[in-house]
Image: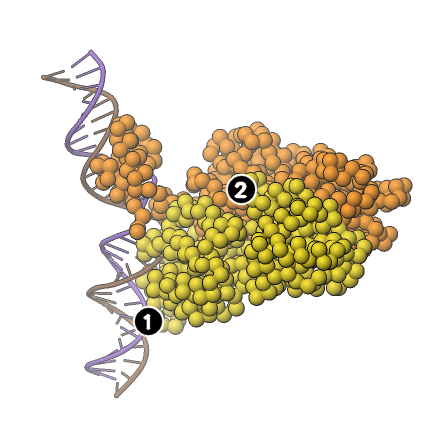
Chain colours: A yellow, B orange, C purple, D brown
DNA sequence: CAAAAAATGATTGACGCATATCATTTTGAG
DNA sequence: CTCAAAATGATATGCGTCAATCATTTTTTG
C-alpha cells in the first residue's frame, strides 16, 4: 500500500538506517556484504527513493538554462513563448528556468553563450544549434545534463536529442507532392536556407530520395539557397519560375516563406502549384486558408519545449527519462490548424 | 533566489505562522483584515506553496484510475501499453495507477465500472466512452477529478477533455483526398463503425463538409456501417465496389481496417484507390509500406495517455493544468511512421 | 596479541508544510 | 464595563530524506 521507506529497507536488510543510507547514496566505507544485503532488500521491497523528500531535505533547486537563437523569426519565438507559459509550473516545481539568447547567424555566438554558462552550476541545459563539442564537454564534465534541440548534435556531446527526424520530414514532403500527381509528370522547385544547415540538408536528402525511387516522372530543379531571407527567396523564385515553365510544385525546406507566399500570390499560381513548406507562422496560416500554401509541416516547438523540460527535470535527478513516443511533425492543411491561441 | 516560505509570508504580513496557515488552507476563523494582509504578502513575495513538501507532510499518495475498454483492438492496447511504460515514473512520483477494464460494446459496462469506483476515494480518473452523467456527477461530488478521453463528454460531466477534434480529422481526410484529385472528378466510398459513435459521426460530418464546399466534383457514396468488424467491412466493401465502379478513394472513419486492406489487396486496386484510414496497427504499417493504404490518421494514444497523466497529477493537487498545445493527430504516410518500438 | 583501520550503529537537525493543542489577546454584545 | 466569542500566537510532531557527528564494534595488519 504505502511505499517502503529507507528505514524499511534497513530493517529488512538487518542493518542500521545509517548503513542503508551509505549504500543508497554511495558514500563508501561499507562492507561488500552489507551492500549486497541492502541492495537485495531494496529489490525485494521495490524501494524507490522519494525524490521529493530528498530534494526537500537537501534544499535543492533545479537550475535549467535554454540557449536559443534570438527571437529572429517566428519559430524560435514560439519556443520562447512556450517556455514563458511553463513559467508558473516551473516555479511550482522549484526549478529556476533561464533563457539565454545568442545571435542567430553568428558562428561563434552559441559557443560563447555556452562557455558563459560554464561557471554557473546549471543542472541542465538545452540548446539549439551546432554546439561546439568543447564547451559542451566541459559542461557535461561538471555534471550538467545536456539536451540538443531541433537538429541533433553528435552523440558524445549531449545526453539526449529532442527534435524531429528531418530526413523523414523531407521524405514525407515528397510523398505528399507525389500523391497529388497521381502518376502524372511534374516538376518541383526546391528551396532551402542553406545546405550547410543540417536540418535543411537532411530534408532535401530525404525529399530527393523518395522522388527518385517512387516518383521518377517528377523532375527536380536545382536547389535555390535563400539564406532564409524573404528577399532572396522572392527574387530567386521569381527568376526561376520565369525561366522554367511548367513547374507543378514547390518544396521549401527552410524559412523565407513570406517571400514564397508573396510570389505565388502575385503570379496567381495557387491553382497550378502545390506548395509544401515548413513551420507555421501567422502568414502561413493565412496562406493555407487562402490556398496559396497547400501543406505546412510543423515541428511543433511548443511540444518540443515541454518534452525538454520534462526530460531535464527527470535526468537532473538521475531518474530515467519519461517514456516519450517519437516526435512526429504535424502536417497541416487548412483544415487542421490548431486554434489560434493554443 | 530561494523561494519564500510560508514563514516569510507570515513575517511580512505581521502575523504568526499559524494565522498565515489558516489563510492559506482556508481553515476559517480569521479576521477579514488578516486575510487581506496575508494575501497581500503572498502576492508581494510571489509565494508558491511547495507542493512536494505539502504532500510529504500529509503523507499523501495520489490514486488515479484509468477506465478503458478491454484490449479489444489495437488502439486501446496501445493505451494500456503506454500506461505500463509510465508505471515506474508514476511510482517515483508517488502515484498509484489502477487500470479498470470494461467490456467494449456493452452499453452499461462503463457505467457500472464507474460506479464501482465511487467508494474508493480516487483522486482522479480518466475514462473512454460516453459516460453516464450520474456516476460521473457522484464522483466529482466526492472530489474526484474527471478527465474524458478520445471522445468528449458534456462539459458539466468532466473537468477536462483529452483527445483530438474529430471534425477536423474528417476535414483533413477530405482535404487530402481532394488534393490527390487535382480538380479531376472522383468518387469516394465512405465507411465507419457506426454513426452512433460520436467520433465516427464527427469525422464523417467534417469529411462531407469539405468535399461539398471545396471539391464538388468528387461524389460520395452512401455510408457503409461496419460495426468495426473486419468481416462486415470485407463483405460490404466488396459488394459496393462491384456495384459502383469508378471509385477513386476510400475513407474509413472507423475501425475494421484489416478487412479493408484485404479487399483492396485482393482486387489489386492500390493504384486506382486512394485509401485513408484511422489509427495505425501492425497491419496498417505493412499496408502503408506496400502502398495499399496511402494515409493513416493517428490519434497517438500514447501521447494522450502522457497528457492525461500529467494533467491529472496537476489538477488533483488543485494546480492549474500544465500548458498543453492542441492535440493534432499524426498524418502517416509510409515515410514518417515512427520507429517500431517507440 | 595489540594497535590501527574499517565498518557500523545511534542519533540529530534541517527542509517546508499540515495539523493539532492550548494559552493568550482582541473584539463585540448586552 | 463584563463576559463570552472570536481571533491570534506559540509551539510541537511528523512526513522521508540528507548530511553530519560520535561512539562502538568488527576486521585487518604487523
Near-viewer residue (B273 or D13): B273
Disc 1 or 2, which lies upstream in sequence?
1
- What's the residue at 41%, 45% (across, down)? A88
In the rendered structure, the residue with mark 2 lies on which chain?
A: A
Query: Which numbered mark, 1 or 2, is in the foreground of this view?
Result: 2
Q: Label 1, label 2: how many angstroms apart (C-alpha)?
A: 54 Å
Q: Using residue B248 as the reference point, say whether residue A191 is left or right of it.
A: left
| Residue B334 screen position, x and y as percent | 71, 57
Which type of secondary structure does the marked residue at label 1 adopt? loop
Near-viewer residue (A298 or B3): A298
Q: Which mark is residue B159?
A: none
Residue corresponding to mark 2: A342
| Residue A175 screen position, x and y as percent | 71, 56
- What's the residue at 26%, 33% (across, down)? B37
Quadrant assignment, res A287: top right
| Residue B311 screen position, x and y as percent | 50, 43
Quadrant assignment, res A252: bottom right
Quadrant assignment, res B21: top left
Residue corresponding to mark 1: A29
Look at the image and tell me whether residue B52 can be seen: yes
- What's the residue at 49%, 36% (across, down)? B144
Contact (Cβ within 8 Å) of mark 1 with mark 2 = no
Badge 1, how many Cα within 10 Å: few under 14, some, many 20+? few
In the rendered structure, the residue with mark 1 lies on which chain?
A: A
Amino acid at each position: 500500500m504505502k511505499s517502503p521507506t529507507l528505514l524499511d529497507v534497513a530493517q529488512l536488510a538487518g542493518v542500521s538506517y545509517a548503513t542503508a543510507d551509505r549504500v543508497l547514496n554511495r558514500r563508501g566505507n561499507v562492507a561488500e556484504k552489507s551492500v549486497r544485503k541492502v541492495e537485495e532488500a531494496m529489490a525485494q521491497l521495490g524501494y524507490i527513493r522519494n525524490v521529493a523528500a530528498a530534494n526537500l531535505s537537501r534544499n535543492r533547486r533545479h537550475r535549467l538554462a535554454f540557449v536559443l537563437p534570438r527571437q529572429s523569426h517566428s519559430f524560435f519565438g514560439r519556443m520562447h513563448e512556450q517556455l514563458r507559459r511553463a513559467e508558473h509550473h516551473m516555479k511550482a516545481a522549484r526549478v529556476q528556468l533561464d533563457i539565454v539568447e545568442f545571435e542567430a547567424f553568428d558562428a561563434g555566438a552559441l559557443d560563447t553563450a555556452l562557455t558563459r554558462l560554464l561557471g554557473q552550476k546549471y543542472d541542465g541545459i538545452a540548446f539549439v544549434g551546432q554546439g561546439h563539442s568543447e564547451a559542451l564537454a566541459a559542461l557535461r564534465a561538471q555534471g550538467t545534463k545536456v539536451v540538443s534541440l531541433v537538429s541533433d548534435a553528435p552523440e558524445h556531446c549531449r545526453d539526449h536529442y529532442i527534435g524531429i527526424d528531418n530526413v523523414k520530414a523531407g521524405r514525407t514532403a515528397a510523398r505528399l507532392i507525389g500523391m497529388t500527381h497521381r502518376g502524372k509528370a511534374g516538376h518541383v522547385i526546391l528551396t532551402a536556407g542553406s545546405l550547410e544547415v543540417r536540418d535543411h540538408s537532411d530534408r532535401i536528402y530525404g525529399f530527393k530520395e523518395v522522388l527518385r525511387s517512387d516518383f521518377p516522372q517528377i523532375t527536380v530543379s536545382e536547389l535555390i539557397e535563400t539564406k532564409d531571407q524573404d528577399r532572396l527567396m522572392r527574387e530567386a523564385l521569381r527568376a526561376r519560375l520565369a525561366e522554367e515553365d511548367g513547374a507543378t510544385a514547390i518544396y521549401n525546406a527552410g524559412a523565407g516563406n513570406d517571400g514564397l507566399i508573396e510570389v505565388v500570390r502575385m503570379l496567381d499560381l495557387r491553382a497550378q502549384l502545390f506548395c509544401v513548406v515548413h513551420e507555421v507562422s501567422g502568414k502561413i496560416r493565412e496562406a493555407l486558408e487562402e490556398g496559396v500554401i497547400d501543406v505546412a509541416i510543423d515541428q511543433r516547438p511548443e511540444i518540443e519545449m515541454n518534452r525538454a523540460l520534462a526530460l531535464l527535470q527527470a535526468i537532473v535527478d538521475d531518474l530515467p527519462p519519461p517514456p516519450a513516443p517519437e516526435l512526429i511533425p504535424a502536417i497541416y492543411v487548412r483544415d487542421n490548424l490548431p486554434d489560434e491561441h493554443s
